[in-house]
Amino acid sequence: MSIALEFSGKTALITGAPQGIGAQMARMSQVQVTTLSPSPRPSPAGRGRILSRLTAKQNAGFAGGSPKTIEARDWCSLSQRERVRVREIATNNRCLRGTCATWLLLTLWTLSLALEPTAHAAAEISEARVKEIAAMLPAKPAGLGRPITERAAWKKLARRPAYAAIVSDARKLAKEPVPELPDDLYLDYSRTGNRDRCQAILFARSGRLATLTLAECVENRGRFVKPVVETIAGLCAERTWVYPAHDGALNNFQGRTVEVDLRVTQVAWELATADFLLGDKLPAYTRRLIRENVERRVFQPYRERLEGRRGSMFWLSATHNWNAVCLAGVTGAALALKESPEQRAWFIAAAEHYIRNFLKGFTPDGYCSEGLGYWNYGFGHFLMLGETIRQATGGRADLLADPVALAPALFASRAEILNGIYPTIADCHPGTRPGEKISRYLAERLGVPVTGNRDEIFSRPDRNLISTTLFALLPRQLPIAQRADRVGDSPLRTWFKDGGVLICRPTKNSKSKFAAALKGGHNAEHHNHNDVGSFSVVVGQTMVLCDPGAEVYTRRTFSAQRYESKVLNSFGHAVPVVAGQLQRPGADARAVVLRADFSDAEDTLALDIRSAYGVPELQKLERTFVFRRAMPMSLVVRDEVEFSGRKPFETALITWGRCKQISPTELLITDGHDAVRVKIDTGGRAFAVRNKILDEDIHGPGKPLRIGISLDFPAEKAVVTLTLTPAKSPAAIR
């Protein structure tokens, strides 16, 4: 279902409304918007009458009354606070709870964005701060690393085998044409929902620019200049730099608008970096082409939106990776291309202002709900943005010196479960680890003990022009931004109290390498999975019981059908199925911590997870974890459920490995040489174990196996206890 709203010459299209919502959605969609120009600002009393009228219209329409109209004139006449009040009243209306409400609120939210006067945006950028920053900047723009003319730096890198390999790869690429990007390939996503086929070519184009530019900087013989020029021309000839998945309506592809997304900002920064590194080795027309395209595709729309001359960009206020990635790309490109110090200062001031929203996306204790992979991506770009600004201002502006940045900076170092294995919560790929360069950079800037060879870590190329150049050519001495105080952390556990995630580890000298990650949280987190109460277990070198992590992204992944995926909804997580119902999405589907007691001997975390299920008869659902460090180590998972009548109940385990029932009440779950023994106690109630492969495209070693443990008969009250202990895999015994 789609809802199209047109007003003041603008159209907002809400697509992907959930299926099966019947007459209720039909009634709700009767709320219309008329295309009327905003009236002059009324008096407070007049706005109060408008507020009452809008609220009454919303409630009548939501309750199934006659079609109502929300006039754009009325909406524009309200202040932002008053508009929020309208939405709050709508939210509190009982008829708005559920899937249908989500989509109507999205409609109202879209209205508020499209009709919101944006003149205030420019006022948020302090003119005084711009002048202050301008005085810190050099007269000429500068990009990352060292230009090709500074031969000492590049000759040092050339002595490393990895850079000899880059030159070898560049020789092969120079003989090949720029990968073609026909219209049909870009349109593939809009037709089939497949992201990968087109993105493979887009990544190859950027990778080609990185390899050829780095090879020319290393060699300085001129033989890679021509293919660099051809690659730049190919990038600048693209109809749009926006990812196909971010241009579902094809407005950018068809030239109806110019938007700024993740790839747009990345390409801009890559081109600006290539221009800075190669300088006059590039023909004058190529350098003009870079500036014209970055100005048209990035700087102009960005500045127009910030100055209130066009609609806003959602990622400026976003609290997830988009904010840091896009701000880094825009600002990095500006520092390398903009001639005027005052103009460069404006971009830095804007970045300083809006990057605060990214940091708001972390809980106060630094938990990253997007998962470790997106921490690498988002916080990694925060660091690259900060280092770029720090170098440009001679160290007088430093994003990492903000006290609010410290807890997010420590997330990865605190999140390890055991033996280099990290949680795969949210859209995280199995096997993800903290970026080595990011970790080393943070250690130096936060005064944390460092390990490994600095030059080897930082100089290792990753075929990304920006990160390779920034880290490979860092100054020898990095100043301390602020010192990390880790005194409060115990090696036995990490408790992200605000994020609701507990990581339990064995004692240092324990013979049993057994650990667990336990998740509370809620079901409206960034890159959310419906996983309140889930857990993973690591034995030795293997996550034997797992969270499957991200699926391969398609159109469905970021649509109203997201939770049709059996690895994104709660069916693909180690949580109960209650009265035949899976968990529901939303911030009010959350775990309430009832008890959090920690000691050297054991850790106990008790959660009330009843709100995660939309089951009216559910009176109680408490999940209690007890992690015991005494030998034999164990994790006890106890579910206590009560209904107002008899209802079915099932719990589950998820693994990449295999499951064998070795006795009526015991399972052996194996993955390679590591295993977990599971003892099932249902208080004497009959139960069944059913294994099901989760048939979804994912990034793991195969298709995950769901092990369902369900009571044979509906119950009014039940207690199901699973006791998990490390075990020897038959493969290890052989």
Image: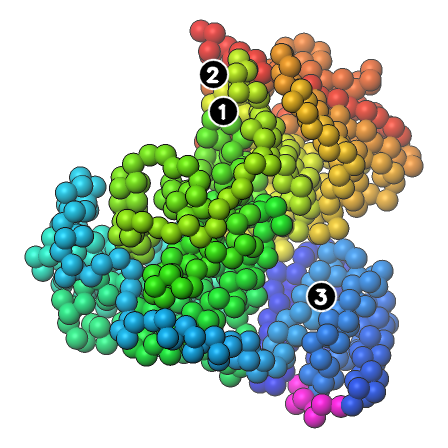
Q: Residue most toward the top?
A: 734
Real-space CA distance between mark 1 and mark 3, rounded to the nearest whole angstrom: 43 Å
Q: Residue pushed farthest right?
A: 644
Q: Report crowding for label 2: few under 14, some 14 to 19, many 20 or more residues within 10 A (C-alpha).
A: some
Residue found 87% across the figure and 28% down from its top:
717
Proximity of marks 1 and 2: CB atoms separated by less than 8 Å: yes
Which of label 1 and label 3 is nearer to you?
1
Residue 321 visible to an observer of this rendering = yes
Residue marked by disc 3: 105
**Type of amino acid under label 2:** His
Quarter of the image for residue 24 reads bottom right
Q: Which sits earlier in the primary sequence, circle 3 or circle 2?
A: 3
- Mark 1 and mark 3 in contact? Answer it, CB < 8 Å: no
- Is the residue marked by circle 3 packed among few (<14), some (14-19), or many (20+) residues within 10 Å? some
Q: Is residue 371 left or right of residue 130?
A: right
Name which quarter of the figure residue 726 lies in. top right
Q: Would residue 35 appear left or right of 622 to someone viewing this image?
A: left
Residue linked to disc 2: 673
Tell me which amino acid carries mark 1: Thr
- Sequence-first disc among 1 and 3: 3
Whole-percent x, y for residue 598 in the image:
69, 28
The segment highlighted magenta reads 35-42
